[in-house]
Amino acid sequence: MTSTLRIVVSGLVGHHPLGGMTWHYVQYLLGLTRLGHDVYYLEDTGKWPYDPARGEEVENCAFNVGYVAGVMSHFGLRDRWAYRGGAPARWFGLPDREREDVLRSADLLINVSGSLGRPQEYRQVRRLAYVDTDPVFTQVGIARGRPGFRDRVDAHDVHFSFGERVAESGPATGHRWRPTRQPVVLDEWHPAAPRRDAFTTVMNWKAKSRPAVHDGRSYGQKDVEFSRFLDLPGRVAPIVLEVAANAGRGRQAPNDLLRARGWRVVDPEGLCLDFASYRRYVESSMAEWSVAKHGYVEGQAGWFSERSACYLAAGRPVVLQDTGFSAVLPVGEGIVPFSTMDEAAAAVREVGGHYPRHAAAARAIAEEYFDSDKVLGRLTDEALAADA
């Protein structure tokens, strides 16, 4: 394992102050801290923040700053964060001089989700690592020449991707995409927590209005795939399928249609808005059932959801639409992939009928494949390697 390092992690905790997003980034901070590193959080997206109460991006970032401060304080990082936002943009958290000292002395900056708006301004850090959490869409964006995008990606020394097979299946970009996955801090998730008899998921119905198109292939969002499985509840009854669906930037999920087809639909803002309620929701579930973005299914790059990794850590099996991850993760127990309606129904019935075995396998997979010690130990070693 790499010796103690000063590491800066960038993310979207404040920009999207939502429970699942918070766990996505916080587990990098917690995991690196538990490995003994000197860790700081920095957020500088160059965008207006999202206000969940209004369902839109806003100029005033007071709520977002307060959210970041509360999250960091809860996890023991009270004096180790910096957030830039508002109109006009200004820094919050660490004083300017201390923030600048941290960056000058940092060994590594991990830019998770490419969240930094101007990574070129952080070249004083010894090494910059880009973590692509939206594979296929990232590579298509570069290949299509999205304005300024290649320059932001090129500003990094080393590149990782949640698409563990994207080097084989994605459009060529000229980068070496090293496989990585969501780190999970295992003792934050509790398999013994009480659960309900429902398969659940938390999702955006549609995050973008138009699919990405490249070389005649279209890469769409979750709504494209979910429509193929609308009648699944009737195929698996009396097993309950529940979905906590965000509208996705103002585009409404068809809740009435979903309910008419047998889905139990709940409001994610009421049940799992912050990190604590999100964890309770995951732990209260029997298992997860979920589709993936159409682009992930079309691209078959091996993406595996950070949300699903949390279900596994909580000892909750996951039934997931295959994106190529079955080539890099163990499947059949704990993780059951599907591609067709018949496979989805059979997978739900299999998990429901042999639940204790699948629940034990789910936690075992999390321990072997998603443990933050292993995932982040490998990532930091590779990020600092001379040939990276």
Image (spheres, rainbow, N blue to C red):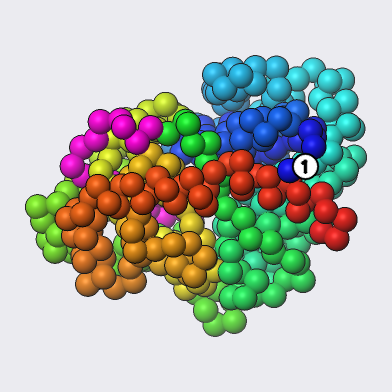
The image quadrant that residue 132 belongs to is bottom right
Left or right of 273, for residue 75: right
Say above or below: 126 vs 365.
above
The disc labelled 1 sits on which kind of residue? Thr
Q: Residue at image x 81%, y 25%?
A: 99
Residue at far bottom of view: 216
- Residue at (52, 79) in percent of width and height: 217
List x then y, in percent, for residue 138.
63, 62
Q: Is residue 98 visible?
A: yes
Q: Reply yes or no: does residue 120 show up in magenta.
A: no
Examine the image and state in which quarter residue 294 appears. Answer: bottom left
Report x, y in % for residue 291: 36, 60
Question: Residue at label 1?
Answer: 2
Front residue (pair 115, 322): 322
Q: Pick the residue in front: 220 or 386.
A: 386
Does the segment drawn in magenta span residue 195? yes
Left or right: where does residue 223 sit relative to residue 220?
left
* Rendered image quadrant of residue 73: top right
Element class at badge 1:
loop
What x and y, as percent, mark residue 90?
Answer: 74, 25
Q: Name the residue at 87% across, 20% down.
A: 97
Relative placement, left or right, of 285 versus 34 is left
Residue lying at the far left of the rendered structure: 238
Q: In what quadrant of the picture does the N terminus appear?
A: top right
Q: Crowding near pointer 1: few (<14 within 10 Å), some, many (20+)?
A: few
Total numbered circles: 1
Q: Residue at x 76, y 35 (%)?
A: 7
**Magenta segment range?**
190-208
Is residue 145 shown left or right of residue 64?
A: right
| Magenta span dominant secondary structure | loop
